[in-house]
Image: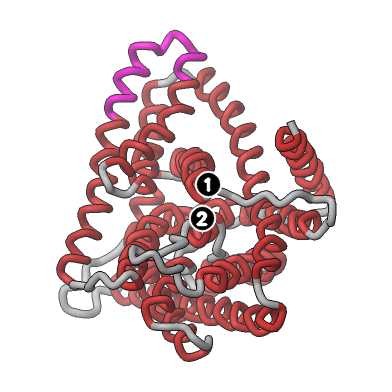
Amino acid sequence: MENYTVLLVIMAIMIGVSGIAEKIKLPIPVLLLATGIAIGFLPSMPGIELNPEIIMLLFLPPLLYDAAFNISFREFRLNINTIGTLAIGLVFITTGGIAVVAYYLIPGMTWPLAFVLGAILSATDAVAAIGITKGLGLPHNTVTILEGESLVNDASALVAYRFAVAAVTGVAFVTWKALLQFGLVLGGGFVIGVILAKLLGIVLRFFRTNDMVVICLMLLMPFVTYVVAEHFAVSGVIAVVTLGLGMSRLSRMKLPEALRDQSKHFWDVIIFLLNGLIFLLIGLQFPLVLKKMQEAEVWPYIGYAAIIAVVALGIRLVRVYLQQFNLQKAFLGKGKGKRRVSQHALFDSKTSFIITWSGMRGIVSLAIALGLPTVLESGSPFPMRNEIIFLSIAVVLFSLLGQGLSLPWVVRKFSK
């Protein structure tokens, strides 16, 4: 009963804070984060430790599905070059860059542990990007790049994380095997997403006259798709995103407009609750992790987290501007083997900076960090587990609070 009461109080606080944030023109995720941190420090507040499996299963599928469902498939396809570059290449570059900094900066950090930290913090977050950029009046092209990148890069980060953790446990790293597994994980997720989207399409056409059944099936399938994909050891993230893209197209072509409107209102309520709750819960985690750190380590590790956050942002800045240059060169037909790109896929330097600044870490980084094994196969404790979790949450907070608070100003400044 006590946990039930706490949950109701948190939900009520989340709804109230979301309404206040809109009134005072602050990004809702940012104010929810700050509120969660403040509440977490209250002496009477019971500790709420998040189960990473619950985060990945309860929050991720519907949030990813909704984002993929509402993204413009045409814009996604036109910007696939940039989305692929940022969602795959940049993830691994960021993993390596953070690993190098962590290894040379943090005492006791080994190379395998540094790569674990890099993998945890390598991907930007779809929920954060959508939640904070919503209502800022960004061009559709820019929004599609941000959403498309953060929808796909979770899978890349999870693959990098698995290999990094394997290295900590002593498993040898073989490049060709890693590349093959990466292709199988992503490709398998795509195949399962396509198959389940086709099956759902057949079922929905059969029940098309029953609005409630159709809406409930569309709510259930993201969870089913994620579980099926993870059961076959492929990317649940890619499977859910593929399902969302497929159902978006089917909805526009086959479902009546009245049913689409009814479904949209239903999903808007679900996403509002899940979106707000996850950011409040992220804030609540910081005081809990802080208590597990030795007092002498807190401020140095906060400094390390700030440096890592800046390094990650710097790597992103360089890669985004390089992508802008490469697209322009490809459009003009320069370079051997370069395929010409659509003019619609090009973006200028101001847009590059907005794309850079909008890349924030969020729930996936938090879930991966909290999901670190507690012990190795030998039975010994996982080295520096608390320190890695603390660094991950601190970087997420620096990213969301720092970039999130300043993003509206950045958009206004660079959209002129």
Q: Quadrant of residue 366?
A: bottom right
Residue stretch in magenta: 198-215
Q: In the rendered view, does 194 fall on the left or right side of 50? A: left
Q: Which residue lies furthest to the front in this view?
A: 379
Vertical side of 102 occupied by 259: above or below = above
- Quick check: marks 1 and 2 in contact, CB under 8 Å? yes
Is 196 located above or below residue 299 in the figure?
above
Among the two numbered marks 1 and 2 on one chain, the one whose residue lies closer to the N terminus: 1
| Above or below, comparing residue 312 to residue 272 in the picture | below
From mark 1 to mark 2, how far is it between C-alphas?
6 Å
| Residue pictured at 46% horizontal, 64% vertical | 123
On the rendered structure, is 369 left or right of 200?
A: right
According to the picture, the residue beneath numbered tag 2 turns out to be: 367
x%, y% of residue 387? Answer: 56, 73
| Residue 201 counted in the magenta span | yes
Inspect the image, locate mark 1, and give the three-letter code of the amino acid beneath it. Answer: Ile
Check disc 2 and give the amino acid type.
Ala
- Where is residue 388 shown, x and y percent of the image? 53, 71
Q: Which mark is residue 389?
A: none
Q: Nearer the viewer, residue 243 or 162?
A: 162
Residue 110 location, quadrant: bottom left
Count all numbered tags in the image, as a single digit: 2
Inspect the magenta stretch and tell me whether residue 185 lies in it: no
Residue ID at (52%, 58%): 370
Report the front residue among 62 and 106: 106
Quarter of the rendering occupied by the C terminus: bottom right
User: Where residue 62 sits: x, y (%)?
Assistant: 50, 38
The scheme the figure's colours follow is secondary structure
* Mark 1 lies on residue: 55
Instruction: State the SS at label 2.
Output: helix
Residue found farthest to the bottom: 104
